[in-house]
Amino acid sequence: MRSLLLLGLSACLSASFGHAANSTIHNPIFPGFYPDPSCIFVPEWDDTFFCASSSFNAFPGIPIHASRDLRNWKLIGHVLNRKEQLPRLAETNRSTSGIWAPTIRFHDDTFWLVTTLVDDDRPQADFTRWDNIIFKGKDPYDPASWSNAIHFNLTGYDPEPFWDVDGKVYINAAHAWQVGPYIEQAEVNLDTGEVGGWNIIWNGTGGLAPEGPHIYRKDGWYYLLAAEGGTGVNHMVTMARSKNVSGPYESYENNPVLSNANTSSLFQTVGHADLFQDGNGNWWGVALSTRSGPEYFHYPMGRETVMTAVSWPEGEYPTWTPIGGEVSSWPLPRAALDIKGVGPFVNHPTPEILTFSNESSLPAHLTHWRYPNPSSFTVSPPEKPNTLRINPSNINLTALNGNYAGPGGQSFISRRQQDTLFTFSVDLDFSPTVIEEEAGVSAFLTQNHHLDIGIVLLPPSTSTATLLPNQTLEQENEALIPQIRFRGESYVPVPKPIIAPVPKAWRRDKLRLEIKAANRTHYSFSVGPAGRQSLMQTLLYASNDPVSWGFTGVLLGAYATTNGRNGTTPAYISNWQYLPQGQFRD
């Protein structure tokens, strides 16, 4: 069936444009932690496409990418960029909490973003678990344009706004699926959050957790798209249609319209989709996917955004090209790189080198876990110019219990892993004076899934290894010494902690800490004196399986913590580098 669908769409593409006119999509279009895509085309804004993604507990939250050619996508900002917009993000408990599945739409010269702040530790039937919210803004390139959250009542999630031709406005959403697995709808005042009564409009096709609904009005029909099967390897996209916006909706007999379930493709978990047109009337689809293969073990970049071409004849259901690393498509719009916005192009494998110079600020793509303490991060402080000073948080990356972090924030700053193969490294200037003061780098998925290598002040008696061949554990006379420590946290087995004294010859200068993807399945963790690559020592290799889990993707970053003690020593980060070294697509 999938081969027939692909052949059918390929034939349609060829008939419309000829083989020479076809283009190729290279997936993922947003590599790394960018799940649950929602995209629109806005001719009024210079024929630009805008896409929003889920962010869960990450901050800034709800990233927006823009493109004018569907091949070069630039981070232009974040909808959630100020704590006062949604203070409760600081209070979420559990790593699967936070911002789920936004929908972005444009109507009456206004951008609307509707989403859910989920407290995933609370029962599904508890309405306080679901904080459904509306943001609106006039200028997506201006962070200040986005409003504070407007709240509305819904015992469910994945809401989207829909404007009907009669002027009525609706919210379509997924009901809490463990309570009632269905799609529901209510009229809404988007300016106030006032909603009417909720009505069930579709029960799905029988797959697990019907969610992520979007309605499209076309050719006199209302087409309802949804995700089913859960966000694992059985994920799929299904559709139904009705002559009335409120139903009844009749399921498509050839569902699912898109899925990579039961295939050997590297791209799995395909689902949670959205549809949009370009300026030539061609249809496109986006969805989330993990590059896990059917084994579903090694996918540290998590759920990413993929795109495909869609054929939608009049009066019929759309046909989607199956997802792969390379997808034949309609001709793409003319190449255009002139996109406003503060961030980098997300799909350009460009080396990143941050020097934290005196006149710079933190780049827009750098990410925290929940709201940071602003005083914890200083670019180019006077005592050490051209560094990033990180004041330690009392809690470490696991925080209070692996799920909650408290109001004080975590001193952690990161960027997404966006390449199968990469090297991430920083120079660290750190002179701890209190036991358990620590600074280092992490491959961080969530508070309960991370792999860290850092410098920590500990007694010599805690050492379990040495770095250099001629180094022995009996050479130390101090009560506390700087030690290199690896430790991990996950729901699956992780390597045992390794503690090795920093060699005495290295203690006077900065150290270089490095995390590298040695291959598709393993990271290496290395340390050495800054500026002397030949002296770098690999402490261990560790599987990326412990950080292949859940809803998010790996963040690579630097941290500083007192591990619950009373220290105050800052860490100084410089020569931050992320070097892309290979992207696997098949």
Image (spheres, helix red, strand yellow):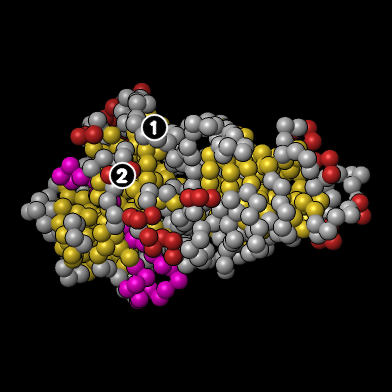
Q: Give the range drawn in magenta.
A: 106-130
Q: Is residue 551 left or right of residue 556?
A: left
Q: Which of marks 2 and 1 is in front?
A: 2
| In this view, 280 is above or below 558 | above
Can you give x and y, in whole percent of width and height, for residue 193 in the image? 21, 62
Decide if residue 144 is in sight here: yes
Q: Residue at x 29, y 57 (%)?
A: 149
Can you give x and y, in whole percent of width and height, for residue 407 in the image? 48, 63
Q: How crowded is mark 2: few (under 14 residues within 10 Å), some or many (20 or more)?
A: some
Q: In this view, does 123 lie to the left or right of 188?
A: right
Looking at the rendered structure, the number of numbered marks drawn on it comes to 2
Residue bearing the label numbered 2: 144
Q: Residue at x 58, y 37 (%)?
A: 382
Question: Residue 197 colored magenta?
Answer: no
- Say whether marks 2 and 1 touch (CB < 8 Å): no
Decide if residue 233 is in sight here: no
Q: Which amino acid does label 2 sit on?
A: Ala
Of residues 392 and 467, which is closer to you in this image? 392
Residue farthest along the left direction in this orientation: 166
- Mark 2 or mark 1, earlier in chain: 1
| In this view, 14 is above or below 37 | above
Residue bearing the label numbered 1: 71
Q: Which amino acid does label 1 sit on?
A: Arg
Q: Residue at x 91, y 51 (%)?
A: 475
Q: Which quadrant of the view contains residue 111?
A: top left
Of residues 470 and 474, which is closer to you in this image? 474
